[in-house]
Structures are given as C-alpha cells and as structure tokens.
Amino acid sequence: MMLEKLRQEVFESLMELPKNRLVTMHSGTVSGRDPETGYVVIKPTGFRYDRLTTSDLLVMDGFGKILEGTLRPSSDTETHLYLYRHRPDIFGIVHTHSPYACIFAVLGRPIPAVMTSAALLGGEIPIGGYAAVGGEEIGSEIIRKVGKCSAIVMQNHGVYTIASTVWQATIDAVEVEDMAKIAHFAMLHGDPIVLTPEQIEEFQTIYRTHYGQKE
Ligand SMILES: [Zn+2]
C-alpha cells in the first residue's frame, strides 16, 4: 500500500471524530497530504467509522486522479484538493458538522475568542458564506475568509480546520467545538468577555515557548 504512515495518521484522526462527538454516522472527512509526492489520502464517502480500515482510504493526486483505492472518495474531496492547491503550507484538513460550532454556522456568526485556547486557532473563528457542496465553491470561500486562522465555520454547514499536520487539524477541530460549546452557554447568561488581540498575541508567544514536550 502507498503512503502507509499517512494512511495511519488519517485513520487515527478519523477515529477521534466520533470519539469526541464531532460527527454522527457518515458525516465528516479527514485528509492528509504527503509533503514529498503531494498525494492526498482521504476518507471514502458514506462509510461507517466503526468499519473503516486504513486500506479503505483512497490515495489521489492533487487533481483527484485516484492512484489507490476502490471505494468512491468523500463528497468533500473537491474542497480538500482546492485548499491544498491554494495553501502550500497545509498538510491536513478536518471537516465536521460538530453541533455547538454549527449553532454559530446556522446563526451566520463567528465563534468569539472567549477562551485562551482561541489563540491557538488564530483568534475569533471566522464565518464563511453559504457555499454549495461538491465543487470548488466551499474551497474558494474558505480561502477568501479564513485569514490567519486554522479554522472556519461555514454558514449552514459545518467546520473546516486546516493545519500543518493531520493530527494538528484534528486537535483544532476538537478545540473549535469546545470553545463553541462554552461560548454558546456563556451567551445564554449574558455577554461573554472576549479576548483582546493583545491577549491573543501574548498567549501565542507563551504557548510557543513553554508548551509541550521537547522533541
Ligand atoms: Zn459537510
């Protein structure tokens, strides 16, 4: 099989989605891009998470030509390929319809930066306009609106996270839902305090220098 390591990474990320209640039944997609070949590993469409194996994942080139795999690829494939072509810095994409983030999607509102964890996502999570599924419309809207953020909420649809690794995009998808949940409940009680751009920048600096284990 081609790209075994990347397949494993995409598979492990996919398994996190139902575990973290970010998807129901068949929804959601994860993909990863191999930095050397530019090939993309992506989930098959309409496939049960609990039956998925690494060999069910598809490998394709940057334009959707299938190089390995017999199943039909995710219905969201065009979006992922568009994003990889327009953002050479990203190597992992996660898409979910996670419910708390989708509250903001149906209100057409960004998710406010109410937690320090927002700093790691780039601040307030922007809202993208409504875009039809299946073509390049979602991808181009994401490129227009995402800015420096690693996540975006698409109106009436769901969340996309884009990152330098598949695993990072997965962590970001969990963080977005977490923050959306807290923001949602806080807004029921009043106006939540939103972090200032200075506080976000300060937290980003602290995080870069102090968080995580040394390599
Ligand atoms: Zn979707």
Image (cartoon, helix red, strand yellow):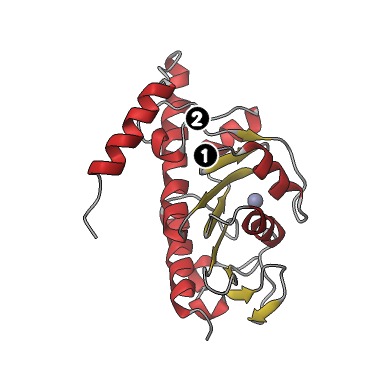
Q: Work out whether 10 lies above or below 167.
A: below
Q: Label 2 vs label 1: CA separation? A: 8 Å
Task: Examine the rendering and report whether any part of residue 22 can be seen.
Answer: yes
Residue at image mark 2: 124
Task: Examine the rendering and report whether any part of residue 115 can be seen.
Answer: no
Q: Residue at x 32, y 32 (%)?
A: 203
Q: Residue at x 60, y 60 (%)?
A: 26
Q: Work out whether 11 lies above or below 203.
A: below
The label on residue 162 is none
| Mark earlier in primary sequence (2, 1) | 2
Q: Between tags 2 and 1, which lies in front?
A: 1
Q: Position of residue 24 (x, y in %)?
A: 55, 54
> Where on the picture, by quarter, is residue 93?
bottom right
Q: Residue at x 24, y 60 (%)?
A: 215
Q: Work out whether 17 lies above or below 203.
A: below
Q: Name the foreground residue: 215 vs 92.
A: 215
In the rendered structure, which amino acid carries the disc numbered 2? Answer: Glu
Mark 1 element type: loop
> Where on the picture, by quarter, is residue 45?
bottom right
Q: Name the foreground residue: 99 vs 68.
A: 68
Horizontal side, residue 199 vs residue 29: left or right: left
Q: State yes or no: discs 2 and 1 in contact (Cβ < 8 Å).
A: yes
Q: Work out whether 212 lies above or below 122.
A: below
Q: Position of residue 72 (x, y in %)?
A: 70, 73
In the rendered structure, which amino acid carries the disc numbered 1? Answer: Cys
Mark 2 element type: loop
The label on residue 149 is 1
Structural crowding at the residue carrying mark 2, measured as other residues with C-alpha within 10 Å and reported as few (<14), some (14–19) or many (≥20): many
Furthest-bottom residue in this view = 1
Q: Position of residue 118 (x, y in %)?
A: 42, 34
Structural crowding at the residue carrying mark 1, measured as other residues with C-alpha within 10 Å and reported as few (<14), some (14–19) or many (≥20): some
